[in-house]
Image: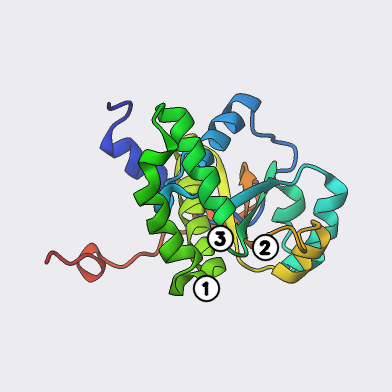
Amino acid sequence: MNNGTTQQLLEALQWRYATKVFDPTKKIPADVWQTLERALVLTPTSYGLQPYRFLVINDPARRAELLPHSWNQKQVVDASHFVVFTARTKITDADVTKLIQRTSDIRKIPAESLNFYRDLMLGDIVNGPRGKTAHEWAARQTYIALGNLMTCAAVLGVDTCPMEGLSPTEYDRVLGLNYSGYATVVACALGYRATTDKYASLPKVRYEAKELVQQV
């Protein structure tokens, strides 16, 4: 399946940048946003566990409350859409059972036929050594989703700004995440760049491919 060209993809990635100033009057059309939401859902994850939730903050008052906990970066309030990426604080037997049942339902196979897969997950990310650092593992999955979202947005002509400059603890408080089983990891503002954003015209700075890519 090829709905575009290699050149179009590279042009979209060259066009995108971490947008510093959004035009608050320009909103992402509903159909485009639904596509981006679907792209988030289609993000690949380890084991397919999808150990995250994406919080789309629509309430202007809630965004304003998050602003001082985001280094006062105006993207939080000016962007068309603002997404907070949260990750599971731990992975439980129930999480594994939920995925096994979902797989059984969708693929129309007996859940018992997936016992090996169930035991593999339980022995690794629940009861194994990685179970002790499950939140860090889950947080890495959110970055896969973040990268996927930004790439898809660029292809659709939507600007983005990934934001690590925030206080996860304060975000959790404002968003009522404490004791929810999820915790804030990173955020992303999406919308359309303002004509006043000087960073839009700056040349992209990247090392040569030979410095970053090695053929082994």
Name the foreground residue: 177 vs 73: 177
Residue 67 at x, y = what percent? Answer: 79, 61
Q: Which residue is drawn at 50% across and 38% down?
A: 101
User: What distance separates the C-alpha of mark 2 from that of mark 1?
Assistant: 14 Å
Q: Which residue is drawn at 53% across and 74% down?
A: 132
Q: Can residue 127 be seen in this view?
A: yes
Looking at the rendered structure, the secondary structure element under dot 3 is: loop
| Number of callouts | 3
Looking at the rendered structure, the secondary structure element under dot 2 is: strand
Q: Which amino acid does label 2 sit on?
A: Ala
Instruction: Tell which circle, 3 or 2, labels the residue nearer the N-terminal end.
Output: 3
Instruction: Tell which circle, 1 or 3, labels the residue nearer the N-terminal end.
Output: 3
User: What distance separates the C-alpha of mark 1 from that of mark 3?
Assistant: 10 Å
Please identify, in this view, whether the residue under mark 2 or under mark 1 is nearer the observer. 1
Name the foreground residue: 88 vs 74: 88
Residue matched to label 1: 133
- The extreme front residue here reads 112
Looking at the rendered structure, the secondary structure element under dot 1 is: helix
Instruction: Tell which circle, 2 or 1, labels the residue nearer the N-terminal end.
Output: 1
Q: Which residue is drawn at 53% across and 47% down?
A: 97
Q: Quadrant of the N terminus?
A: top left
Q: Identify the disc placed on residue 105.
A: none
Residue matched to label 2: 183
Q: Is residue 133 left or right of residue 55?
A: left
Residue 129 at x, y = what percent? Answer: 44, 75
Q: Which amino acid does label 1 sit on?
A: Thr
How packed mark 3 is, by other alpha carbons closer than 10 Å (few <14, some 14-19, many 20 or more), is many
Q: Residue at x 58, y 52 (%)?
A: 94
Residue matched to label 3: 91
Q: What residue type is labelled 3?
A: Ile
Name the foreground residue: 157 vs 151: 151
